[in-house]
Amino acid sequence: MATRAAALRKRQRDVSPEARQTIKEAITTLVRSGIRQSLGLYWYGQQDAYWVTPDSGDPELELWATLVRSCGWWWPRDGVCVVSERPLAIRTDGEHRLHCETGLAMVYPDGWGVHAWHGTRVPSWVIEDPTADRINGSVNAEVRRCAIEHLGWAAYIEQAGLRVLSQAPDPGNPGCELQLYDLPGHPPSRLLLAVNGSAERDGTRRRYGLRVPAGFDHPLDAAGWSYGLTGAQYARLQRRT
C-alpha cells in the first residue's frame, strides 16, 4: 500500500503546471455546468429585449417587457426571483470582442467587473501591471500570451533577461525569422519566438512564443518539434499556417 501511495505521489509531481491548469479548468467547467443544470431554467433578461414586443396589450408580456428593459440575467423560481444588474459599460475591440487595454472591459454598478484582452478573460494584472515575473509565474498559456501581447515582446524579453541562443529564417513563412531563447524556470525550457503563418482578421501577423524542451539548440529543430517533424523536415516546408 505504501509503495502504491509513493508511486501515486511521484505521478502527481510529474504532471506539468500547464497540465494541472488544463485539468482544473475542465473540472471547473463541469462543476459550473452541473450547478446551472441543478438550478434549472434561467432567462437572459435584457438579451431578450430584441424580440419582446412592447405595448402588446397582454399584462404578462408587459411585465416581461418591463423586466428586459431594466435588468440583466435573471432566474425566476417559485416564491423567489434572482435578478442581476445590467452592466454600466461594455468595451470591445474592432471585432466586437470584450477588450480594454486600460481597465475593466465590463463594469457593473457595484464596481465588480471583468478584465479581457481581445475576447479572452484575464486576471487584472494582465491589464493593469503586466511584468515578466508575473508572466513567467502564470501556468495558463492563454494568460501568458495576452500579458506578453500587452507588454510587448521587446519589453518582455528585456525584463525577463532572456538570452537568444540562435536564430534563422523561417522556411515555412518567407520573410520572417525564428528566434530561440533560453527560458528561466523549473523545469528549464526554451522559448521559440515566431510569426503566425496566417494573417489576423485585421491583416496583421501576430508574433507568438512557444515553450519547447530545453534540449533544442536550433530554432528549426524547435519549430519542427511543434509540428511533429524533425528540423530537417521542417526546413523543406514551402508554406505553413
Image (spheres, grey):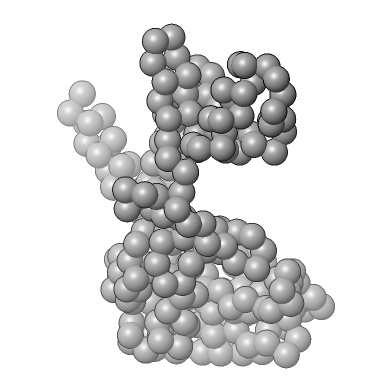
Where in the figure is residue 187, as x and y percent of width and height?
33, 65
Q: Quadrant of residue 44?
A: top right
Q: Nearer the viewer, residue 85 or 129?
A: 85
Residue at figure coordinates x 56%, y 37% from the top left:
69
Where in the figure is residue 95, as x and y percent of width and height?
67, 63
Side of 188 relative to 197 (left or right): left
Residue at figure coordinates x 52%, y 70% from the top left:
210
Establish if 105 lies above or below 29.
below
Q: Nearer the viewer, residue 112 or 205?
A: 112
In the displayed orientation, state which residue is furthest to the left. Answer: 2
Q: Nearer the viewer, residue 150 or 42?
A: 42
Side of 66 relative to 234 (left or right): left
- Would residue 19 be seen by someone viewing this image from the given angle? no
Where in the figure is residue 201, as x and y percent of width and height?
73, 69
Quadrant of the image for the C terminus?
bottom right
Instruction: Tell how many labels.
Output: 0
Quadrant of the image for the N terminus?
top left
Establish if 116 lies above or below 25.
below
In the displayed orientation, state which residue is furthest to the right. Answer: 238
Residue at figure coordinates x 41%, y 61% from the top left:
104
- Would residue 132 be seen by someone viewing this image from the given angle? yes
Q: Quadrant of residue 200?
A: bottom right
Establish if 11 lies above or below 214.
above
Where in the figure is residue 155, as x and y percent of width and height?
40, 86
Residue at figure coordinates x 42%, y 40% from the top left:
85
